[in-house]
Image (cartoon, rainbow, N blue to C red):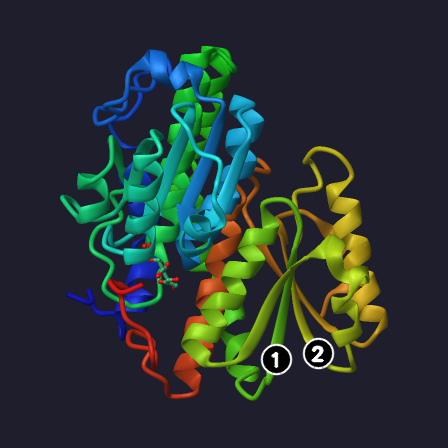
Amino acid sequence: EKDGYPSFMEKEIHDQPEAVAATLLGRSDIDGKLTLDEMRIDADVLKTVNKIIVLACGTSAYAGQVAKYAIEHWCRIPTEVELSHEFRYRDPIVDEKTLIVSLSQSGETMDTLMAVRYAREQGAKTVAICNTNGSTIPRESDAVLYTHAGPEIAVASTKAFLAQITAAYLLGLYLAQLRGNLFQGQIKDILADLAKVPAKIAQVLDNDQQIKDLARSMSDARSVLFLGRHVGFPVAMEGALKLKELAYIHAEGFAAGELKHGPIALIEEGQPVFVVVPSPRGRDSLHAKVVSNIQEVRARGAKTIVIAEEGDESVRAHAEHVFYIPETTTLLAPLLATVPLQIFACELATAKGYDVDQPRNLAKSVTVE
Ligand code: F6R
């Protein structure tokens, strides 16, 4: 059942091309028209939605943060992402025009279930993005969009994360289609780019030796920092979470722009810092800004480890190590950039002799609040 891999975690990291492909399958036609079968909320209601709140915990919340960038960009609907357990206790503003999108791999996370129930009581419509058929959260929601990642056995989430981003993107495109925010041709182009992602993930997986070697060489690291901007920010936080969970190493993800507002004080000689660099072809000056963030930490002694797009030579001069991922659009890059970070954490934990499938103190589904 591990398909010859030494752990479920490694198997599931390798399942990712299939997880994304299966989540895309059968949800659009040749013209890029999306049909989401289990979206049992009236089109008229979806057209009047004036706010989206994404509710989730842990890795699923990072998927939500990635999706926020895409949904706001495509649909122009203000979108918040909130940890489920924080949401309920702050008197949130929720009404009939609020669309709640919950993200849960298990569909049983009590914090998220309670938050969804609460929002529903306030009159909001709820969509569950979930990996487990017939689980509680989708049963208690108005609509469901299943991720088809297949069963995730390892406690730490990998393939469910990529499938959640994929499904949340489909939801965003569906809303944009319904509300007329994007032309059908634009949706078709984005879906075509998405369809190319599985093969690109497979390419990252085929070239994993360099990141594994690095992981093995860093098994005595005491603290690792991760920086990213825009969609690279939640990717950085996910990279840090994987390292905490699997390798029990102190790790933190920061928005690169936040560095000079505090975290740069942490940088000292030899501090390993991963930097998720956006495509140089992307919009604005995002790329240049992140490159200058790399220079800032390096000037203070950081050991910089960079994830960048293939062909981006500008980062080489500033990095101890560069890992290249295939070209894609800015919004789709998290589906690729996350993968080396997962491999890094898994390999480092394995090198330390830890059980990557069952990290200490953690449970696969958190059914208590
Ligand atoms: C991290 C991890 C957890 C879960 C979180 C939510 O690797 O697995 O952070 O993402 O407990 O779980 P679900 O998605 O089942 O609601």
Where residue 28 appears, as percent x and y from the top left, is 31, 21
Where residue 87 appears, as percent x and y from the top left, is 45, 49
Q: Is residue 93 found left or right of 150 in the rendered image?
A: right
Q: Which residue is mark 2?
A: 271
* 137, 85: nearer the viewer: 85
Residue at point 33%, 51% (across, down): 112
Badge 2 element: loop
Check if mark 2's residue and mark 1's residue have beta carbons within 8 Å.
Answer: yes
Q: From the viewer's perspective, is residue 207 above or below residue 144?
A: below
Quadrant position of residue 285: top right
Camera sees residue 188: no
Residue at point 75%, 34% (across, down): 284
Q: Quadrant of the C terminus?
A: bottom left
Q: Residue furthest right?
A: 299
| 3D distance between C-alphas at marks 2 and 1 | 7 Å
Quadrant position of residue 153: bottom left
**Mark 1: C-beta under 8 Å from nearest atom of ligand 1:** no
Residue at point 24%, 62% (across, down): 367
Badge 1 element: strand
Q: Quadrant of the N terminus?
A: bottom left
Camera sees residue 12: yes
Image quarter for ligand 1:
bottom left
Q: Residues within 10 Å of mark 1 (few under 14, many from 20)?
A: some
Q: Residue furthest front?
A: 91
* 55, 183: nearer the viewer: 55
* 32, 217: nearer the viewer: 32
Q: Is residue 43 found left or right of 181 in the rendered image?
A: left
Q: Amino acid at mark 1?
A: Ser
Q: Which residue is mark 1?
A: 223
Q: Earlier in the sequence, mark 2 or mark 1?
A: 1
